[in-house]
Image (cartoon, rainbow, N blue to C red):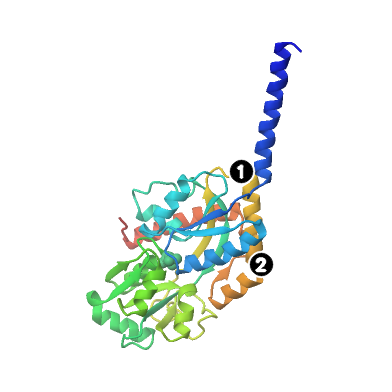
Amino acid sequence: MTSFRRALVSGALAFAAASFAVHAHAQGYPNKPITLVVPAAAGGPTDTVARLIAESMGKTLGQSVIVDNTGGAGGTIGMARVARAAPDGYTIAVWHIAQATAPALYPDLKYDVVNDFDSIGRITDVPMTLVSKNALPSKNVTEFFAWLRAEKAKATYGHAGIGSASHLCALMLLKGVGFQVEGVGYRGTGPAMNDLLAGQFDFMCDQTTNTTGHIKDGKIRGYAVTTKSKVSSVPDLPTLDSTVLPGFEVSAWHAMWAPKGLPKEATDKLVAALQAALKDPKVVERFASLGTVPVDPSLAQPAPLKSYLEAEVKRWGEVIKAAGVKGN
Ligand code: ASP
């Protein structure tokens, strides 16, 4: 064989080996554990949703999906980390409505909430609840607002950082009564709930995922839900809309994203595993007991999430601007 032919043959072999390696890698996805970033502290509602989904997806994918809590700055620290991660399917995120509120509240945001991520799919719609420490004198939603109006600047509420669902809900609620009170920021409503249980601040607006159990156990007082309809996990609570704040409606939602540029094979496998998780009886049962509503699996895929996020960015941008709410 001439040296020219030898070079050609070895070049062709090298090319074949390289394409086989790429193909084998893609075929083999996932061949190591996947990190699922939760941009809020452990023990909160996003963490609860993410851990249930992660366990179920891990079974479908044949690899562990390990939750990594990276809380702080209303979730923007964790999502910045995901935006910068390699788009190989081994770093993904579960986050919520704050992905849509961040552009309006964080003018210095270092990533584009729509274009720096690949959408995997929507996961839940979650009603929120207005709750307080048991030591407050109010026993129902009307009494709570009377207390709040009398207390004004002396009242305190907890939240999970600027733009988080709990922050947004409290701001909208206070906008409704016409004054603001001091908020205490946490890395998530997991730790905030611990402080509410200990009576460190007065009230909070948080997802049913985090409040249902404590309301039922009588450890905190539930006053109302933030959706237009009542919620079956907390059937005694009226809506804010039908009581003290007509027209009030705020609810949270969760979804799954990956860094921009995910290979199609990884996207397809993650979508299939997410859809299977939403039908997993263990997930379905636990969500139901927490008042956490799974989306129809047809929405747990990239296109419906991308268009929903775009619409939510627009909607919340306008609401936040009209309400005069400021972030950092
Ligand atoms: N539920 C929190 C929030 O208020 C975040 C969390 O801890 O999951 O947005």
131 is higher (above) or lower (below) than 35? below
Q: Which residue is mark 2?
A: 279
Q: Is residue 180 visible?
A: no
Q: Is residue 252 left or right of residue 120?
A: left
Q: Quadrant of the N terminus?
A: top right
Expressed as whole percent of the image width and height from the top left, the position of residue 297 reads 64, 62
Indicate yes or no: mark 1 CB to ligand 1 under 8 Å.
no
- Which quadrant of the view contains residue 322? bottom left
Task: Where is residue 168? Give x, y as percent.
Answer: 38, 65
Task: Look at the image and tell me whether residue 152 can be seen.
Answer: yes
110 lies left or right of 200:
right
Which residue is at 57% across, 67% downward? Answer: 52
Q: What whole-number distance in Å separates the C-alpha atoms at marks 2 and 1?
A: 25 Å
| Along the viewing direction, whichever of 90 and 312 lies nearer the viewer | 90
Q: Judging from the image, what secondary structure is the residue with disc 1 in?
A: loop
Identify which amino acid the numbered label 1 is placed on: Pro
Residue 53's tag is none
Residue placed under numbered mark 1 in the picture = 263
Identify residue type, mark 2. Lys
- Say which quarter of the image contains residue 206: bottom left
